[in-house]
Image (spheres, grey):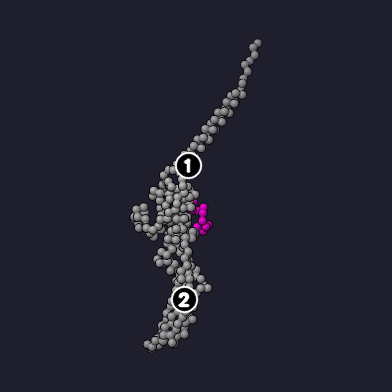
Amino acid sequence: MADAPTDHPQPRTALSAWHLLIIASLFAFAISAAVFVWFIHRVTGPISSASITQEFRDYVPTVGPTDGILETATSSVPEAFTQSDSAWLFNIPLGTTVSEIRVPAVYRYHIQLFDPWKLIVSGQVCLVLAPQFQPSLPPAIVTDQMEKSTSAGWLRFNGDDDLATLERGITAELNKRANDKVHRDFVREACRQSIADFVKTWLLKQDYWSQDRFHQIVVVFPDEVTPGQPLQESPPSGITFESQPRPSP
């Protein structure tokens, strides 16, 4: 009686294992290729204004102070405060009291990082519509450098009272001055430079700062934008900050 044929399952098992190995290798290769293509496209492909703005907005909460305030400028300005007071008695002048306080004031300005940002791609220029810079109130004063003086008329004896009244009003007056055009324009370019440096740090991290990408940043504030006029057509003058681009690999 002939022997029954013998099964040989081991080669089939070995073949299945090889199939799985090949499939896994192909799958890993496909993922690696996709990642490589995505990276090459990200590094060399065009960037849209919408995508770069969203990337930057996602980045902002991960950096900076937890309160979202980024200080952009500090200035020390000698300020003077004057008050005069005249008096009459039966149309007879009794004289005028003139009081003056001089003191250095320290103004600080900041932006709210979580306020709206807009980044616009214009060739190799990154045009940044930044949040409006604002004064940090109240300003500080250097009290040990405060100078007081008063002069009173021949029948006036209120010099000390006038000085005390004048000193009490310094904080309110400094708050007004911090937000006036003269003081804001004085720190405008410093604020612009701080924001340009902040954006450039991000561009460097993203490998967007190179000879074939961005090598120029233009910072614009909302109070410099003409309503109804495209920002790309007429950016304000004197707002470009350019650094030597990092060489491409």
- Disc 2 residue type? Ile
Give SS at disc 2: strand
- Disc 1 residue type? Phe
Horizontal side of residue 227 vs 12, given as left or right: left
Q: Circle 1 sits on which residue?
A: 39
The segment highlighted magenta reads 59-68
Q: Is residue 53 visible?
A: no
Q: Circle 2 sits on which residue?
A: 101
The image shows residue 143 at horizontal and vertical percentages of: 52, 72
Horizontal side of residue 27 vs 120, given as left or right: right
Give the prevailing secondary structure in the magenta stretch.
loop
- Name above or below for residue 21 compared with residue 44: above
- Name above or below for residue 26 compared with residue 74: above
- Residues 214 and 33: in front is 214
Q: Is residue 65 magenta?
A: yes
The image shows residue 76 at horizontal and vertical percentages of: 47, 67
Q: Residue at x 46, y 41 (%)?
A: 40
Q: Are marks 1 and 2 in contact (CB under 8 Å)?
A: no
- Residues 216 and 87: in front is 216
Label 1 crowding class (10 Å Cα cut-off): few <14, some 14-19, many 20+? few
- Name above or below for residue 80 compared with residue 184: below
The image shows residue 74 at horizontal and vertical percentages of: 48, 64
Q: Earlier in the sequence, mark 1 or mark 2?
A: 1
Q: Residue at x 60, y 23 (%)?
A: 11
Q: Is residue 139 magenta?
A: no
Mark pair 1, 2: CA separation = 63 Å
Q: Which mark is residue 218?
A: none
The image shows residue 127 at horizontal and vertical percentages of: 40, 53
Residue 20 figure quarter: top right
The quarter of the rendered structure image containing the N terminus is: top right
